[in-house]
Image: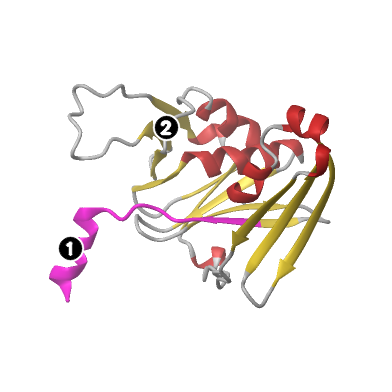
Amino acid sequence: MKSVMSVFRSLPSLEKTVEGCSIKLNTASSCLVIQLFCKYGVTKTHNLSYQECESLQAVYNPDSCPNVLQAQARLLSDAVVHFPLTLAEVTLRASPCGKVTLRNYVEEELDASKAMLTELTLSREEFLAYQLQDQREITFCLREFRGLLAFAESSSLPISVHFDRAGCPVVFCVDDTVLEAHFVLATLSDADDASQSQNNR
């Protein structure tokens, strides 16, 4: 998609010089041909190759997740606003004692004493539903999380978080009488969990 957008990147100059546009899909050569017909008989041709790919289907069942949190989207949006926009991942730690902590994820290779740490704690009372078996910690992509929070908040719907453990997908559900949306995000696997499961084999 970025390749297609680059053809039209300078709209002000395109509006002044381009008189017409032709877009053709050449399936024989797997190429998208975009021709811009400019003033003075100049024709700019862009041949963009493409490759078919399989769409991935996530295998998940939110009902099989032992841990479920449900909150108004506004609560979670207000929580993540404290994290910088450049932050890639956020860690959610939830415990049966009634405490949910969101903090920025710091890779093990980085010196934690030199990194800026942001941590925010929410209590059980702030959630609409709070079902946890054990203390769990999952790390997932903050950018996608912000996007789904914006969607849920615009719909004025609560969001449910279904998860098991690190390395298993986390499923965010937004449900209404006319709408049901499931957002499935990958979580980083915990090195300790991975080594423990290998030792148990």
Report the residue at 48% width, 39% height from top. 142
Label placed on residue 87? 2
Q: Judging from the image, what secondary structure is the residue with disc 2 in? A: loop
Report the residue at 23% width, 58% height from top. 193
Q: For marks 2 and 1, give the one nearer the viewer.
A: 2
Q: Is residue 144 left or right of residue 168?
A: right
The one nearer the camera, 106 or 161, is: 106
- Identity of the residue furthest to the left in this view: 199
Contact (Cβ within 8 Å) of mark 2 with mark 1: no
The percent position of residue 124, horizontal first and vertical second, equals 49, 36
Residue 151: quadrant of the picture: top right
Q: Is residue 196 magenta?
A: yes
Residues in magenta, as a range: 182-201
Q: Earlier in the sequence, mark 2 or mark 1?
A: 2
Q: Is residue 182 left or right of residue 39?
A: left
Relative to residue 182, is residue 27 depicted above or below?
A: below
The percent position of residue 200, horizontal first and vertical second, equals 16, 72
Residue 31 showing in the rendered view: yes
Q: Is residue 4 magenta?
A: no
Residue 157: quadrant of the picture: top right
Report the residue at 20% width, 28% height from top. 112
Label placed on residue 196? 1
Q: Judging from the image, what secondary structure is the residue with disc 1 in? A: helix
The one nearer the camera, 173 or 33, is: 33
Relative to residue 15, is residue 65 depicted above or below?
A: below
Q: Residues within 10 Å of mark 1 (few under 14, many from 20)?
A: few
The percent position of residue 150, horizontal first and vertical second, equals 66, 37
The amino acid sitting under disc 1 is Gln
Give the quadrant of the C terminus: bottom left
